Image (spheres, coloured by chain):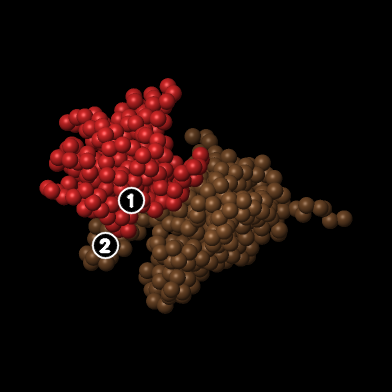
Amino acid sequence: MNAIETFLSTNLGKLVAGVVVFLIVATIVGQILARTVTSDGAKATLANANARIRGWWVMVAVFGIAVATGGIGSIVLFAMVSFLAMREFMTLTPTGRGDHAVLIFAFFIFAPMQYGLVWAEWYGLFSILIPVYAFVAFATRAALAGDTERFLERTATVQWGLMACVYCVSHTPALLMLQVIDHPGSGPTLLFFLVLVAQINDVMQYIWGKAIGKHPIAPTVSPNKTWEGFVGGTLTTIGIGTALWWATPFTPMAAAIFSAVITLLGFAGGLVMSAIKRDRGVKDYGALIRGHGGVLDRIDSLLFAAPVFFHLVRFFYTPPLIPAP
Amino acid sequence: MIAAALAAFARVISGASVQWQQPVTGSRQRIWFGNHSSHLDFVLIWSALPPALRATTRPIAGSDYWGRGPIRRYVAGTVFRAILVERSDGAPTAERASATIQHIATQMGAEASIIVFPEGTRSFTGELLPFKSGMYHLCKLKPGVELVPVYLANLSRILPKGELLPVPLSGRVRFGEPLYLRDGESKEAFLTRARDALLRLRDS
């Protein structure tokens, strides 16, 4: 009991408790509405919304356990997320026979190594392993395999998948290695802030889009993304993110800017991943989480936001490597 | 126990989802026939079956490979209760082929279902090869047996022929509508019909 009380007295604990309370309210409201609405369209919308809420419970439980067990729990969780996301991505990628060894490299060497480096807090190698060493290794190994058909396309796609699913995602638990000036041990809070704002943004864009969405932003890519949903969702999310400044090392102004960065890049990530799905002719990357599609459908808003958020915080809030003279 | 563990392992490695176009009912004798491109194929079909059907379903395995060494013999004989058949090098004679089919039919008895890969070997590219005629002759010996097409998607990418390590991509097992050998149907017509059923399943 004492441990729970201690946890709830921390900023992170308060954030987690807030999310749980919010989910309880959402679940109750969703269930009541599902029993009262009459039109078929509203019923379908609510069934979808309630499935999403149930999926949220599962994700919050998993995420809560991961964050509560400290560094290693989060690293293992995101490593699994990366693995499942990359499985979904590579399944849709038209790799050929000559890529078998390259895929083995991606799944069994580079992905585990990247997370091992997060655990070891070896920032230098963590930040170049995939852009430099995987880049060189993939192209060389694919060339040795001798299959030249669509060579550049295949090699580039596998590299892209590893970048998106492993390199980008690994920047989320990598926040744990940052030592923020005057706020030691704020890594878990930063991690929770990033994921929370990105996910709130998804929900807000969905709600605003459903409520008043009319004009699609990129109709050929994603008919569900509308200007109304984008503007309403972005502003609401920035508002909520700013209101959470007290839990973070940021001033209210900085929290607003970081929320805006996460929100805009979350939108960009979702849009790009939709374009890929459209190109491959599928609606979802998978069907792992009920109501949410695959893992990649759920984390697409984190892909671009995580590395940029990581580097902005690292640049502005951690001590420089070489102290100023 | 071991069989269930192996089945679970194959399912995890291949991340396979299972789809039934038409649910199977009853415990009649069946031939599950699928496309063959990987060593995981049999275990995957087997693991995708409902446990009750799994209990009566036996694989066909080459005795030249599965009859060698205590571990393989244990896995093939005790775990999966495989029906071992001789695979001849070079051109098989008509008598030997016929004896093999007779052996399978006898082993099936009145209860057992089997899993077969009528292409006869693993496809190198994942494309569906022409069917060998064994399945036709077997149906002649087992009148009324139900044939269920099973299409395995992506297995040729997960563990292609000639590779040792599987890549953990997502596979898919799709069971189609059953078909039967018709009265007086010719070998060619039957094999074409069975192969087309598998191709339709692939494209559906």
| Residue A10: % across, % down | 57, 45
Above or below A180: residue A7: above
Q: Marks 2 and 1: same chain?
A: no
- The answer to which quarter of the image holds residue A292 is bottom left
Disc ID at residue A43: 2
| Residue B26: % across, % down | 16, 39
Q: Colour of chain A?
A: brown
| Chain letter for the part of the structure drawn in red | B
Point 44% across, 51% down: residue: B125
Quadrant in the picture for the C terminus of chain B = bottom left
- Amino acid type assigned to the residue bearing label 1 in the image: Pro
Point 48% across, 50% down: residue: A87
B20 left or right, relative to A229: left
| Residue A160: % across, % down | 57, 58
| Residue A149: % across, % down | 54, 60
Point 67% across, 44% down: residue: A121
In depth, the one of A167 and A249 nearer the eye is A167
Judge whether residue A82 can be spotted in this image.
Answer: no
In depth, the one of A194 and A2 nearer the eye is A194
Query: What residue would you read off at disc 1?
Result: B130
Point 16% across, 50% down: residue: B185
- Amino acid type assigned to the residue bearing label 2 in the image: Lys
Q: Residue furthest top?
A: B70
Quadrant in the picture for the N terminus of chain B = top left
